[in-house]
Image: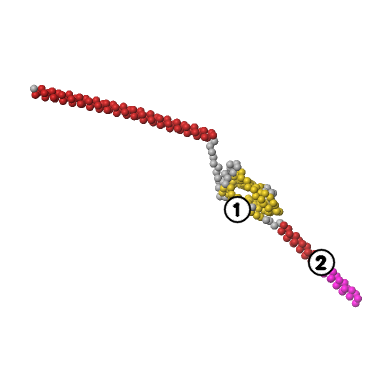
């Protein structure tokens, strides 16, 4: 009887010890999971990405350079970066690096660019945008950014650069114009000479014709006078 009681007591004690061990293990597991969850939440809060547009008043920056144009954006070293270019003209290409991006716009038209830059932590930095036109005069725009990522919208409208003649081209043009003027003057002078010669010939012909007509008229008048005199003389003789 004593032996059975001892066995029962030992069984109860063993069951109690096992139950306490299981409860302790569950409690530790719950505590560990809670701690890990809190750490994960804290880490997620710390890693929250803050993407902001750095356009002044939310309005895209606008430039109107001559082609070929390059748009250069420089910034602190980033973990992710890319640029999107929208245009009806496909004559453009882009280069990208952790510290800067460049868009080369070789056509004529309107280009819409969106620069996208991302970091793994908050970064306070100055950002520089440089637009180089075909005339070689750069336009620089500075911005300030404090976030874990930013976007920048830029609209670039390119046009053909006007061309001007060189000294050699101007000299050739003036020489050609001078030759043309001299040729026109020569033709005009020749035309005047021809007209004068024609006028002289025509005048001479008119004088000759008039002279002949005068001579003919004079002869006819003289003959008429002689004939009239003969008639009068005959009539006078008959009357006698």
**Residue 67 location in percent, x, y?**
57, 44
Say whether residue 17 is magenta: yes
33 left or right of 221 in image:
right
The residue indicated by pointer 2 is 24
**Residue 134 location in percent, x, y?**
58, 42
Q: Residues within 10 Å of mark 1 (few under 14, many from 20)?
A: few
Q: Is residue 200 above or below residue 155?
A: above
Q: Is residue 192 above or below residue 89?
A: above
Mark 1: secondary structure: loop
Q: Residues within 10 Å of mark 2 (few under 14, many from 20)?
A: few
Say whether residue 207 is magenta: no
Q: Is residue 42 above or below residue 93?
A: below
Whether residue 31 is visible: yes
Name the residue at 42% across, 30% down. Answer: 186
The residue indicated by pointer 1 is 59
**Residue 63 location in percent, x, y?**
58, 47
4 left or right of 70 in image:
right
Q: Are marks 1 and 2 in contact (CB under 8 Å)?
A: no
Return the residue nearer the eye: 54 or 42.
Answer: 54
Q: Residue 226 lies in what quarter of the image? A: top left
Farthest residue, direction bottom: 1
């Amino acid at each position: 009887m004593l032996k059975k009681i001892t066995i029962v007591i030992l069984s109860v004690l063993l069951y109690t010890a096992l139950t306490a061990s299981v409860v302790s293990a569950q409690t530790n597991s719950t505590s560990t999971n809670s701690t890990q969850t809190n750490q994960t939440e804290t880490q997620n809060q710390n890693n929250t990405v803050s993407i902001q547009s750095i356009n002044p008043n939310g309005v895209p920056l606008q430039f109107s350079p001559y082609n070929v144009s390059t748009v250069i954006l420089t910034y602190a070293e980033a973990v992710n970066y890319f640029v999107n270019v929208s245009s009806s003209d496909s004559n453009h290409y882009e280069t990208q690096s952790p510290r800067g991006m460049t868009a080369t716009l070789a056509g004529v038209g309107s280009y819409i660019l969106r620069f996208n830059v991302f970091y793994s932590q908050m970064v306070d930095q100055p950002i520089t945008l440089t637009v180089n036109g075909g005339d070689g005069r750069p336009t620089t725009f500075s911005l300030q950014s404090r976030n874990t990522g930013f976007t920048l919208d830029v609209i670039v409208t390119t046009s053909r650069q006007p061309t001007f003649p060189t000294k050699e081209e101007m000299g050739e043009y003036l020489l050609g114009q001078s030759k043309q003027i001299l040729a026109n003057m020569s033709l005009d002078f020749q035309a005047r000479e021809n007209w004068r010669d024609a006028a002289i010939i025509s005048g001479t012909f008119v004088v000759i014709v008039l002279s002949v007509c005068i001579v003919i008229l004079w002869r006819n008048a003289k003959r008429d006078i002689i004939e009239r005199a003969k008639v009068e003389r005959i009539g006078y003789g008959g009357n006698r």
